[in-house]
Image (cartoon, rainbow, N blue to C red):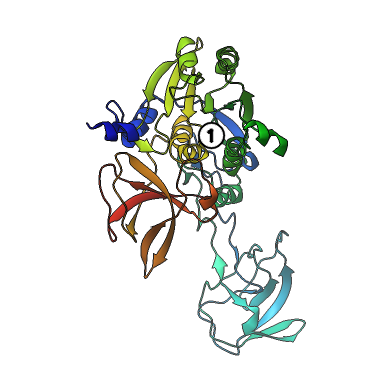
Amino acid sequence: MSSSMSACGAEQGLITVDQALALILDNAQVLVAEQLTLDQALNRYLAEDVYSQINLPLFSQSAVDGYALCAPSTIEPKSSFELVGEIQAGHGSELQLKQGQAARIFTGAKIPVGTTTVARQEIVSVIDSSNIEITESLKAHSDIRDVGEEISIGELLASQGQQLSVGAIASLSMAGVQTVQVFQYPKVAVVITGDEVAVSVEDFASGKIFDANAPLIKAWFQQQSQQVEIFHVADTEHAVTALIQTLSQDYDLILTTGGVSVGDYDFIRPVTLALGFEQIFWKVKQKPGKPIFFATLARADHSACYLLGLPGNPAAVYMGMQIYTSTLLNALQGQKQPPNWFSAVLTHDLKMDARERFLRMSASFEQSVLKVKSLSKQQSHMLSNLMQANCLVRIPAGKSMFEGQIVQGIFIHS
């Protein structure tokens, strides 16, 4: 391999993106389950199947505001019925209809015994307080929701591994489910390394910069409906050792930014290994984020602590969160699957690079074809194009890409 290829990050020994993802999935130990109320379970993964304990609907009910009727067959226009009562939704009734009788009824109300059909109020003419007339032909069993027509007792509502979306929670709630068994969410500590973080504009005079990584990561987890604890640590071996040693006993995942390369002040990897972590991989043939580091620690109680070390450049952190952190978090909750890549058409040429690249792009449909367009300012220290990006697109290593070729990517919420 030429020195130029090595210099741009394709030196020997690097693993591919797919190999790194496979290693994460192979080494992630699924966490135990816990029981939560439905209002706590948004975005969590079910640890067991959920079966209905009730019928839906619970009882046969009216689908409209109208009149419950008792008639032997199809009702012809100008048929009259004796009005014998009224039934509101949510109110019980002992009313029983006989042939030729009707009851005022409202949407969702339980139909009385003897009902053969329901006439919506738009086709009913009220003659007087005791009699009504049907103005249109009406078939038997119209506008009746039958007991159990949607869900019956014992029917599967949701499967193990399913993520609880807003719709899933609404569906389970309607079926009377109040609590669910879900895989425990990993307890996450975020460690931001470095002495260069500015607190005020005055700090710029000494060469410091504002921190984008902590707000980026905190917001990313908030988007997943999860809270994390964030720690800042100075670039000293003693400080990094003390913090990682403490966190490794209390957290399932330690997510770090910076300190994973080969600089004089990059202490994350040597400290982690000295504390007994096993390196799973270090350095991936990708851009940005080559020096990503993944290690595991087996604890005395047979549980594990995972450390995922991301480079310090904010674009590398962002990519690492979307690709690797997401994969690891899902795997710890029983979802051992790689990212769900989409396929799209590239709208322009791209030069070759020795490493696989993740480019921030804009995706849109044109005549039912998904197309992606690269954005400017792709350097690893830049984030401004996230204002326009809605996807990360994989560009293969060592290949020039041309307009019209198919590429893979994932959608993001920037």
**Residue type for callout 1:** Val
Q: List x then y, in percent, for residue 342.
A: 36, 52
Q: Can residue 200 be seen in this view?
A: no
The residue that appears at 50% across and 51% down in the rendered structure is 152
Q: List x then y, in percent, for residue 372.
A: 39, 58
Q: List x then y, in percent, for residue 55.
A: 55, 51
The residue that appears at 40% across and 19% down in the rendered structure is 279
The residue that appears at 43% across and 39% down in the rendered structure is 323
Position of residue 134 relative to residue 403, above or below, is below
Q: Which residue is nearer to you in this view: 399 or 231?
A: 399
Left/right of residue 235 with respect to residue 48 in the rendered view? right
Q: Can residue 271 be seen in this view?
A: yes
Q: Which residue is nearer to you in this view: 297 or 95?
A: 297
Q: Which residue is nearer to you in this view: 319 or 130?
A: 319
Residue lying furthest bottom: 78
Position of residue 114 relative to residue 286, above or below, is below
The residue that appears at 60% across and 90% down in the rendered structure is 78
Q: Name the residue under label 1.
A: 182
Position of residue 35 relative to residue 396, above or below, is above
